[in-house]
Amino acid sequence: MDKIFYFLSFLALLSAGMVVATKNPIHSVLYLLVTFTAITGHYILFNAQFLAAVNFIVYMGAIMVLFLFVIMFLNLNEKIEPMKSNLMKFVGVIAGCVLLALFVGTYKSALVMPVQPGVDTQIGLLKSLGLVLFRDFMLPFEVASVLLLAAMIGAVMLAKKDWN
Amino acid sequence: MESIINVIELDKYIMLSAALFCIGVTGVLIRRNAIILFMSIELMLNSVNLLLTAFSSYSGDPNGQVFVFFIMAVAAAEVAVGLAIIVVMYRNTSSIDIDLLDKLRN
């Protein structure tokens, strides 16, 4: 079990690093897909079956296809890829490392949440999440549908060439 | 099957999510391609999702996983609008370099 955890974590970190490091945008999308696969694997390890399915369908299916579609639509490749200067890259990487050190340092000096013994491992199943979603989160669920409708109309409005 | 929360302690998930988030921040800082910037933001959102799920599983509270579901819905809306903006931007400047987007400054 812990071997699977370490493998998935290594895969996620490696491919996440490749997303920001590789020059070709299409390779970036494919590496991001690998990262999302690893995160979906983590959800399965948590027994969060609903989230694993939604992550698989929404992120790896819909959103990644949208990214890939736009990249191919705009005909981006590594020859026209705009890059920052090496100094800016160096400063950016240093800033990222400092942020990580800040997170780790803050966590080390914070109170650690004790793990409750015998927690319910069935909470990620569709039945339990559905009950919570449609009982306690009914209004946010409906508002989210309005948000998605607004986003859809907004995307069509923005991308359409002329309205006359 | 033994559950993961008895084998791996929560610290490791916090470290993993922090590292993924910092890789996303680094991506936003070092790239100029608007689509790669979007992908870095997706990476950050996913690291937060993973951490919320971890906290939710370790404390046995399903509310965290419902929040992850809402974050995914908002992320989908954000990507749809953001990519439409990128397409419009490409149509106007024939480039997706965000350093060209300083027209508001002058």
Image: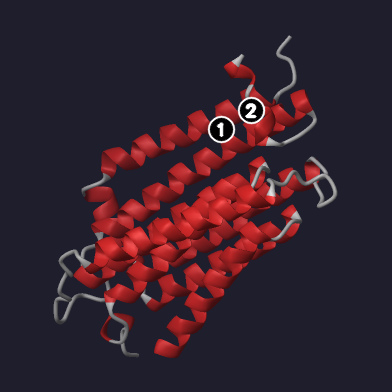
Gap between marks 2 and 1 measured at Cα: 6 Å
Determine the residue positioned at 46% across, 85% down.
Answer: A4
Determine the residue positioned at 51% across, 59% down.
Answer: B23
Residue sitting nearer the eye, A99 or A52: A99
**Residue where numbered disc 2 is placed:** A156
Query: In which quadrant of the rendered view does residue A32 lie?
Result: bottom right
Q: Secondary structure at mark 2?
A: helix
**Residue where numbered disc 1 is placed:** A152
Q: x and y percent of residue A35 in the render?
A: 56, 66
Left or right of A124? Residue B26 is right
Q: x and y percent of residue A93 in the render?
A: 54, 57
Q: Secondary structure at mark 1?
A: helix
Name the residue furthest right.
A79
Q: Is residue B94 above or below residue B63?
A: above
Left or right of A112? Residue B57 is right
Determine the residue positioned at 73% across, 61% down.
Answer: A27
Answer whether residue A58 is visible to the viewer in this image: no
**CB atoms of marks 2 and 1 within 8 Å:** yes
Q: x and y percent of residue A89 in the render?
A: 62, 52
For badge 1, the amino acid type reads Met
Answer whether residue A93 is visible to the viewer in this image: yes
Determine the residue positioned at 40% across, 48% down.
Answer: B71
Q: Chain of mark 2?
A: A
Q: Is residue B11 above or below residue A161?
A: below
Q: Which mark is residue A11?
A: none
Bin the neighbour count of mark 1 within 10 Å (Cα to Cα): few under 14, some 14-19, many 20 and up: some
Bin the neighbour count of mark 2 within 10 Å (Cα to Cα): few under 14, some 14-19, many 20 and up: some
In which quadrant is the C terminus of chain B drawn? top right
